[in-house]
Image: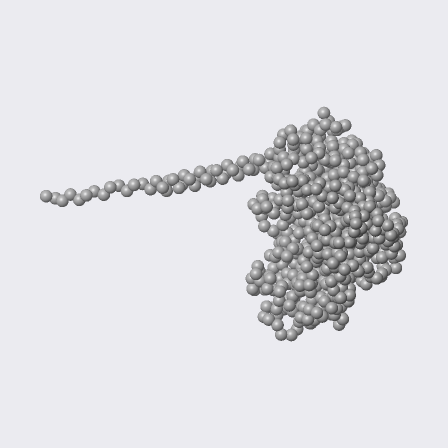
Amino acid sequence: MEAVLPQSKPKPKRKWKRRVLWVFVSLLLLIVIAVIAANVFLSRSLPETKGDLLLPALLKPVTVIRDSSGVPHITADNEHDLYLAQGYIQAQDRLFQMDLSRRQASGELSEVIGEKTVKNDKYFRTLGLRRAAESSYAGYSSEGKAALDVFAEGVNLYIDELKDNGKWPVEFTLLGYEPKPWTPVDSLTIGKYMAFDLGGNWEDQAFRQYLLQTFPKEKAYDLFPDYPKDAPYIIGKEELDIEKSFAGAVIPYEFNGSNNWVVSGEKTDTGKPLLADDPHLGLATPSVWYQMHLKAPTVNVSGVIFAGIPGIILGHNENVAWGVTNTGPDVQDLYIEKRNPKNENEFAYKEKWEKAKIIDEPIKVKDGKTIDYQVTITRHGPVVSEFAGKSGKDTVLALRWTALDPSAELEAVLNMNKAKNWNEFEKALLKFETPAQNFVFASNDGTIAYKANGKIPIRKKGDSMLPVPGWTDEYEWKSYIPFDELPKTINPKEGFISTANNKVISDDYPYHISNNWAQPYRQMRIQEFLEANKKLTAGDMQSLQMDQVNLQAREFVPQFLTILNGPSGKQEQKALEILQKWNQIDSADAAAPMIFNVWMKKIGDVLLTDEIPEETLKLFNGRKSAIDELLREALSGKPGPWIQEAGGLEQVLAKSLQETLKELEKTQGSDLTDWEWGEYHQVRFDHPLSSVSPLNYLFNGEGGIPVGGSSVTVQAAAFLDDGTVNHGGSWRFVMDLSDMNQAYHLVGPGQSGHVKSKWYHDQLEDWADGTYHKTRLDKPKGDTLTLKPE
């Protein structure tokens, strides 16, 4: 009998594979649906840029054409409609930025952010920018108030529209709040913040006071820009703790400055003037600047403005062009106030106790209790030394500052917009009191001019080097430099005028302007270029704005190489060889700029960080210039205490170079020949909400973009400790006055604050490589929106 073999059963199908595939496809589908839904949600709040819109309060229709770079060209039949439309259009593109700006300056961030910003709010409540704005409104003319009022009305029309349709920009949704109605004071407060952001000098006074309280006199004076003319009043450290007093103070970037220059027709290819301006401010998304073109029968002006403000602050009209840099004058004084031990709200003045003004500034905190906060104001100004808590038994520091006085800068802006010549423009500057700025000017009649404009105090005594006694009238401000005596030049024989936050006038000038000036390298390079060239063109001006020649390196590298010519490690020798072959140009594809620029920072760290607390070093606005001067003195054979106590110049250079290479090797590798400045030195334009992960992927896009330049080159690109470029030419502007209808602009990273807009980051790459767009006054083309009255 034949054996019957057992038949094998059929293998069960592997259903699990099918299930995994089904789950994977389902997840993929869900992800796709989620992405589409998120995209639809984000896009629903994009503003209308085409078609017709009804806008109540308009008198006549207004045309808004957004060109290929997203620049709105607003044409109206009257100024009422022009500024109302300007408010509406700015809100379309920048409402969240506008709201955040007014909250920052007013000390109201905690209401929507929470406890993290309480100290920030206390600081700005103490300064009182909003109080200064409120007191300024009354001083505006009827025309100025009208512009502010209708601009606010335009913003509110857009806010009302969003309340009706619920299509809020995503930032409001993420933070869970709706903005309050806009007011004229909000615009003025942002204007006052401009004065804050462009810096002051109280921090330097506090830092020098700290030096005198902490170190021997010679060592303290070694970090001063000069020796004080008057003997300083010394208070004991136990009476006033500088470090504690200003812990958490919001310090603007050192020398928030700019470059500008104007060239006479005698040196240009067209025979007409050229003008260039690039203000150096923080680089973020959205840009601090918003570019616009405003046209009505009485005005036709193009340029940039801070979002939240009417008019055009920098740019040109059909007859004139202008730009600014920060003058950086000493417009602040810290007064040492003696407190009555029996009444903390009274302070000594001329042998009597004066009662201070106490202002309630309650701070609302999201998901928390309202904080009862009070600001003390003496006859000199707010007590700024105690916003972080009580820091002195019997003395405090009060701030006197021109920006805290009523002023009418925005009215000056509106008048500048209409100027037809230098005389009219200079007359408009009468009301531009703060911040003091270096204005360069050109007109189509061939005039070029410069004026350091603004209120600069004349003191009875003292030179604003240190805090001064507040209990006597010896150190009061007696007046301001007369308007007609402010530094000015018209049509100079050199054929050009340039400024870069440098010293603006010789020591023969009868008035004190400043103790601190920016490092001179940008100004030196600009003048070197303009002196050497004739038949200049707008293209040459753009090239100069992107110039990466490092004159600081030209000064110091050869001397450093001479000092460090002895035995050293292999990596140090390689670094010195790279620097030896360097052409002193901060190009993104070279290793030498990385070594030198980080080395210069490390030299300061080696000299200062072990002896001065980090919080106090933040007050040292003149740090870079001071380090340069310490090095110059040491290289000339006269090392000061800081260099000597660190072991001498050779030891300082060797140690700082070692620390530089050690730090860079962590991220760049050990082969110095493979290093590239742009691999470390990258611009990102961070959004304010991108610090919260994963929102950085939404708002910031992909990684950084490699850029050349540095803080001392004309192409300004200052960087943080991790190499992130966070400060530089926030707007670049070039104009050839042979054609008043056009100018060249760069607004990094783009015009729109809306993450889904095609103009959100469209100028990011352009900013990095210096590709400008042309904006014309005549016949603009693009998306057309017609705003119609009901």
Above or below, 200 against 181 in this view is below
Above or below, 97 against 661 in this view is above
For residue 6, side relative to residue 680 (left or right): left
Q: From the image, which quarter does the N terminus lie in? A: top left
Q: From the image, which quarter does the C terminus lie in? A: top right
* Nearer to me, 662 or 64: 662
Instruction: Mark yes or no: residue 752 visible.
Output: no
* Nearer to me, 400 or 93: 400
Residue 47 location in percent, x, y?
Answer: 65, 34
Which residue shows up at 74% across the image and 48% down it?
197
Residue 325 location in percent, x, y?
Answer: 77, 51
Q: Seen from this angle, which residue lies furthest front?
A: 342
Which residue shows up at 79% across the image and 51% down it?
341
* Nearer to me, 233 or 440: 233
Which residue shows up at 68% across the image and 71% down it?
647
Quadrant in which residue 632 is drawn: bottom right
Q: How is the image coloured?
A: one colour
For residue 115, side relative to residue 378 (left or right): left
* Nearer to me, 295 or 652: 652
Residue 553 location in percent, x, y?
Answer: 70, 63
Instruction: Mark yes or no: residue 120 visible.
Output: yes
Q: Seen from this angle, which residue lies furthest top?
A: 790
Which residue shows up at 83% across the image and 35% down it?
143
Q: Seen from this angle, which residue lies furthest left?
A: 1
Q: Seen from this angle, which residue lies furthest bottom?
A: 566
Residue 528 location in percent, x, y?
Answer: 77, 59
Quadrant in which residue 664 is drawn: bottom right
Q: How many marks?
A: 0
